[in-house]
Image (spheres, rainbow, N blue to C red):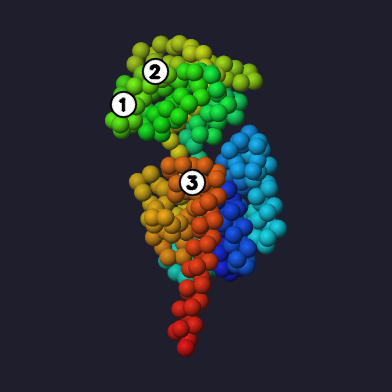
């Protein structure tokens, strides 16, 4: 028989947004429950050195997540190793059913399931991830001062990453599998005007060379099929991200890319009492620190929502 449990606030996801929401909710005496999901700790668990987290000159991504998890537990969060398989936000309390069979009834929900970068799918890419292969120029560009790096992609993200990398790298090569970019004209104008950026058109990265770090990439012409090598010290993959929102399809409003829509300057979704924080609703910044900030906002907004609901119940009873 399935176990049914109730919580004032259910946090789905365990990256910086989820753990921060848990810490703030616990400190507000809400006794939060956090269901950690398929990849506890999120994307930072596959990140090596983190040098842009305030208060830490350098820390390994998995270590940072363990510290956040430990703090969430210490202040009173119940962390459950399980996966939420379905949700129903059409009734109250909200219902979330886990893989284990546990059914959670929640007065409020914080969605913090994050997003994942799209990769090229190369074995060498997986082997060298964190050793010169990255999906975040803001996170890792600092490590490539004075070096030659390549960026793969043709949209605004790829162009913006290439421009950002010129602050550090000696040369940046943007590689696109087509003959024209999808990025907006303003970004393209900035790109083409930057003397540090070179373009490679109609090319796909089909391999990455190097044993302990990136030494070069193999390019295959998408028109002729010809191959050539390009010596680079780093490769940034900027072909998009996929928010982990399939679970919430039809439950909350999303944009055309599957990111959850939230109210301006808020984490409130289209369903009152359901909040979204972190990369699941942020396709602009995608940083651990901004995700943590949104997690804080979600917990505070959930606390206020519960307080208003309690006040309303008292008024009705009177």
Residue 15, percent from left and from top? 58, 48
Q: CA distance from mark 1 to mark 2?
A: 12 Å
Residue 183 drawn above or below residue 77: above
Q: Residue shown at 49%/83% (left/top)?
A: 314
Residue 49 in percent (x, y) is at 63, 34
The residue carrying mark 1 is 189
Q: Callout 2: few (<14), some (14-19), or many (20+) C-alpha neighbours within 10 Å?
A: few
Mark 2 = which residue? 195
Residue beneath disc 3: 279
Whether the residues at callouts 1 and 2 have beta carbons within 8 Å, the answer is no
Asked if residue 164 lies left or right of residue 60, the reply is: left
Above or below residue 124? Residue 224 is: above
In the displayed structure, 129 sits above or below 228; it is below
Pick whichever of labels 1 and 2 is earlier in the sequence. 1
Residues packed near mark 3 inside 10 Å, few (<14), some (14 to 19) or many (20 plus): many
Q: Pick whichever, 92 or 169, lies toward us.
A: 169
Secondary structure beneath label 2: loop
Label 2 to label 3: alpha-carbon separation: 33 Å
């Amino acid at each position: 028989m399935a176990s049914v449990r109730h919580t004032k606030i259910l946090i789905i996801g365990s990256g910086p947004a989820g753990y921060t929401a848990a810490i703030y909710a616990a400190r507000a005496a809400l006794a939060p429950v956090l269901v950690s999901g398929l990849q506890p700790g999120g994307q930072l668990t596959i990140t090596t050195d983190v040098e842009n987290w305030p208060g830490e000159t350098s820390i390994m991504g998995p270590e940072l997540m363990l510290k956040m998890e430990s703090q969430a537990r210490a202040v009173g969060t119940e962390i459950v190793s399980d996966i939420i398989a379905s949700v129903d936000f059409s009734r109250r309390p909200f219902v979330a059913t886990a893989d284990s069979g546990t059914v959670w009834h929640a007065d409020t929900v914080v969605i913090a399931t994050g997003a994942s970068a799209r990769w090229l799918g190369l074995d060498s890419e997986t082997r060298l991830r964190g050793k010169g292969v990255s999906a975040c120029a803001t996170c890792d560009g600092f490590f490539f001062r004075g070096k030659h790096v390549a960026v793969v992609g043709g949209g605004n993200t790829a162009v913006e990453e290439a421009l950002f990398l010129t602050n550090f790298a000696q040369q940046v090569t943007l590689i696109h599998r087509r003959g024209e970019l999808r990025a907006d004209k303003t970004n393209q104008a900035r790109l083409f005007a930057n003397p540090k950026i070179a373009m490679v058109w109609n090319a796909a990265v089909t391999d990455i060379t190097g044993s302990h770090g990136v030494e070069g990439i193999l390019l295959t012409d998408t028109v002729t099929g010809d191959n050539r090598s390009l010596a680079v010290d780093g490769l940034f993959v900027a072909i998009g991200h996929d928010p982990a929102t399939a679970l919430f399809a039809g439950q909350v409003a999303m944009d055309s890319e599957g990111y959850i829509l939230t109210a301006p300057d808020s984490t409130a979704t289209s369903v009152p009492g359901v909040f979204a924080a972190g990369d699941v609703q942020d396709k602009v910044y995608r940083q651990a620190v901004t995700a943590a900030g949104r997690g804080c906002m979600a917990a505070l907004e959930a606390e206020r929502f519960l307080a208003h609901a309690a006040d309303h119940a008292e008024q009705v009873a009177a």
